[in-house]
Image (spheres, rainbow, N blue to C red):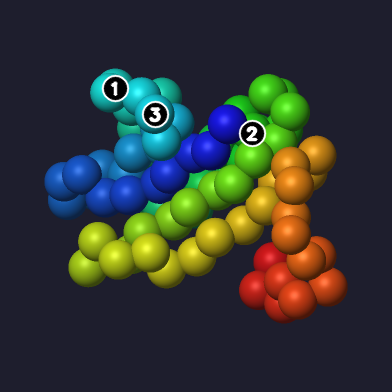
Amino acid sequence: MNRIVYRRAPYEWVNKRTDADRAGSVHKTQDSAEEAARDMLRGTGGGELITKGLDGRIRSKDSIPPGNDPCPPRDREH
């Protein structure tokens, strides 16, 4: 299961599953939304965490174990 973090409104960051219509949680900061998404992914068997920046473009991707990272040694960001 994959999760995405993005800004919905000023001071409102959303953490939701990529296949969901509604937010899983809403946070005041991007960091807290990312941490909540990581915790949810760890609890559901891992997956991909996608984070969008203020401009709406993908800023970061991270595989959360036990997800399937295609090439773990190349991931130098996380």
- Return the x and y of residue 33 as percentages of the image width and height: 46, 42
Question: Which quarter shows the N terminus?
Answer: top right
- Return the x and y of residue 57 as percentages of the image width and height: 30, 66
In three-dimensional space, the C-alpha distance between marks 1 and 3, rounded to whole angstroms, equals 9 Å
The local crowd at label 3, few if under 14, some if 14 to 19, many if 20 or more residues have their Cα within 10 Å, is few
Q: Secondary structure at mark 2?
A: helix
In three-dimensional space, the C-alpha distance between marks 3 and 2, rounded to whole angstroms, equals 14 Å
Disc 2 + disc 1, Cβ < 8 Å: no
Q: Is residue 28 left or right of residue 61?
A: left
Which of the numbered marks, if any, corresponds to residue 22? 1
**Residue labelled with disc 3:** 19
The local crowd at label 2, few if under 14, some if 14 to 19, many if 20 or more residues have their Cα within 10 Å, is many
Question: Which quarter shows the C terminus?
Answer: bottom right
**Residue labelled with disc 2:** 41
- Return the x and y of residue 75 as percentages of the image width and height: 72, 71
- For image coordinates 53% across by 38% down, the residue present is 2
Residue 4 visible in image: yes
> Looking at this rendering, what residue extends furthest in the front direction?
70
Disc 1 + disc 3, Cβ < 8 Å: no
From this view, report whether residue 66 is shown above or below residue 70: above
- What's the residue type where badge 3 is placed? Asp
In three-dimensional space, the C-alpha distance between marks 2 and 1, rounded to whole angstroms, equals 17 Å
Q: Which of the marked residues, 3 or 2, is nearer the chain's N terminus?
A: 3
- For image coordinates 36% across by 24% down, the residue present is 20
- What's the residue type where badge 1 is placed? Arg
